[in-house]
Image (cartoon, helix red, strand yellow):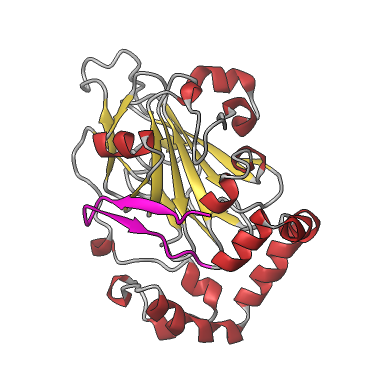
Amino acid sequence: MEPIRYFNRHTGTLETEQVYGEGFLRWSYGNPLGALSLQAFVKRPFFSKWYGHRMNKPASSSRVEPFIVNYGLEPADFADAPSSYRSFNEFFYRKLKYSARPIDANESSVVFPADGRHLGFSRASEIAGVFVKGQKFDLAALLGDRELASRYADGSLVLSRLCPVDYHRFHFPVAGIPSQTRLIDGPLFSVNPIALRQRLAYLWTNKRTITQLKTEHCGTVLCLEIGATCVGTICQTFTPGQLVAKGTEKGYFAFGGSSTLTLFEPGMVNLEADLLENSAQQIELYARIGSQMGHLAHSHDSSPSATHLA
């Protein structure tokens, strides 16, 4: 299989992803024997629960320093010293210093909700050929609600893929008032391109959560988190019904790769040019949480669907 390439906004270069557990992924999703293992064990929640239990044990903390070295992480960005983590999982969902991820201050901007490799599309209903030709995105299945899907069918969509080496807390892309989070249960397939090239539907069959964010200037934004292999736990840390600022932490994933997905109502947000251009070539854009994902399509005064927050 071909390597995973992405464009790094911050360095301006096309880079090759260093995939954590690449051999196991390619065997599971590309080998007939691996496929049997995938269906029997790997996709099932008990496998991720078992692996997560291992990563919560104190002995797993011995993995932290080698992981930092092997994947070139920057400890100066961490809110706590590497030696302070009592398990690998605690390190995995570590917090960062605010200075490490500044939030774009432009009032008309919306920001990426997580560090990761992002794909952006101007119309959710026209997404096709993601990672491989012939695969069409099923928005109704993703949301578990055909009426809601029809409301967002012509809106912008951003899929943000987090690798195990990434910062694994996710944030709100814009200010607003968040709803209670709705859970749609499901299996836990990988969301790495190695897996998605085989079957994009893992995105809308995996365990996922949906929060509706009521905003003043860009309608109601749908914020989703998608679980994956070894990510059986999606933790929400916000308070429903309480106003949040742009960039406020929303929650975190426990160990493993995972994804967030952001959906905007039609005509509310224009995505950034580099995101759209790379996505059109099926190349993910690497960008950090807080950097600009898009901007309001209308001025504050002229937006026809602006909703004033209570």
**Residue pushed farthest front?**
1
Percent position (x, y) of residue 88? 53, 76
7 in magenta: yes
Residue sitting at x 64%, y 25%: 145
Using the rendered image of the protein, determine whether residue 181 is visible from the camera's viewpoint: no
The overriding secondary structure of the stretch rendered in magenta is loop
Give the extent of the magenta segment: 1-20
Residue sitting at x 62%, y 58%: 233
Please give left or right for residue 89 compared with residue 122 in the image: right
Residue sitting at x 31%, y 73%: 74
Please give left or right for residue 153 compared with residue 199 in the image: left
Please give left or right for residue 22 compared with residue 114 in the image: right
Percent position (x, y) of residue 185? 70, 44
Q: Please state which of residues 222 and 157 is positioned toward the viewer in this rendering.
A: 157
Percent position (x, y) of residue 284? 38, 46
Compared to residue 161, the image places residue 61 above or below, namely below
Asked where in the image residue 231 lies, by quadrant, the reply is bottom right
96 in magenta: no
Percent position (x, y) of residue 60? 58, 82
Asked where in the image residue 18 lies, by quadrant, the reply is bottom left
Q: Quadrant of the C terminus?
A: top left
Using the rendered image of the protein, determine whether residue 105 is visible from the camera's viewpoint: yes
Q: Please state which of residues 34 and 157 is positioned toward the viewer in this rendering.
A: 34
Compared to residue 70, the image places residue 252 above or below, namely above
